[in-house]
Image: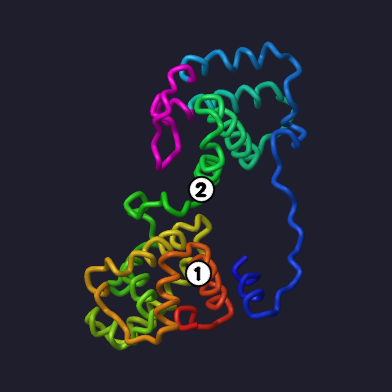
Amino acid sequence: MFKSLFNKLMGTEEQPAQTPAQPTPQAHSSFQQHDDENDADEDDDDSDAIEDQSNGSYNPETMHGNHYTEAQFEAEVERRAQDWIASNPEDEFLDADVKNLWVNYGNDLFAEWNGRERLERFRLLWGNKVLGYATFGSTKAADHADNPLLAPVHGWTLQDYCAACSKVASGVAVEDICKAMGCELPVWEENNAIWPSRMAQDSSFTVSVLFGQYFGEADQHPVLGALKAQGSATGEATLQRLKEDRYFYEELCGARQAAYEYGMDGAQW
């Protein structure tokens, strides 16, 4: 994805390959709809009591309504998924099939219990949770404290590295960053090699998502936050746009990662 974006920015865009559509309960041979409407009515009976208690309040981080718990929600999704599997004993359900069931039943159940107003945002959060992917804005480092990919590199945390990258992008000299952090240039070079490598091998995208969050908070870093560069008017305008234009920021992050994949210094590029 990032290479495609990099090619686009550099004017060497290639025609993307077609990817197969993700199977859904409606498309998979094991996921045909029940013919017996009574079965659907029975599935709805258990959720009606919770649905009727909705008062419009919800958790902004998960989008779940406050009239039920996440444990109740996931238990109902599991019940529906297992009922479907039990009703199709002739089919083999792989792990991906079960996750697909969870994604689809979760989306349907959310609409039943909460309506459709927040459904699109919930789809992203729920799908990433089931599939094990991190989500920008809702991933917290404290929830991944035991993740070895987040372990410090020569004493630098991911937050340190992100703040340093942000300062480099704003024109601060690497030497000034190293001086502020109390380290030699090779330490920065090691960090600048290891953290991007970890992002590349992280299938959950946790490191990349946290990088994006920390990058935007660089001015709050206790050591590097106050570092400023004497930039040009163009540079200052670009920095201001980074703070205000989310899509511009995401485009540059993608280009930065693509540069690393091409063997370039992404932060400097």
Give the residue type that dot 1 points to.
Cys
Q: Nearer the viewer, residue 268 or 35?
A: 268
Q: Quadrant of the N terminus?
A: bottom right
Q: Mark 1 highlights which residue?
A: 253
Q: Please state the horizontal and vertical placement of residue 263, each as a whole percent of the image.
A: 55, 82
Judge the density around disc 1: few (<14), some (14-19), many (≥20) Cα neighbours within 10 Å. Answer: some
Q: Which residues are magenta?
A: 51-74
Q: Mark on residue 132?
A: 2
Residue visible at 76% across and 18% down? 35
Left or right: where does residue 88 sit relative to residue 131? right
Q: Quarter of the image holding residue 147? A: bottom left
Q: Which mark is residue 128?
A: none
The first of marks 1 and 2 along the sequence is 2
The spot of residue 29 in percent (x, y) is 77, 34
Q: What secondary structure prevails in the magenta region?
A: loop
Q: Position of residue 124 (x, y in %)?
A: 54, 45
Query: As rendered, which of 101 and 51 lies closer to the eye?
Result: 51
**Are there few (<14), some (14-19), or many (20+) residues within 10 Å of tag 2?**
few
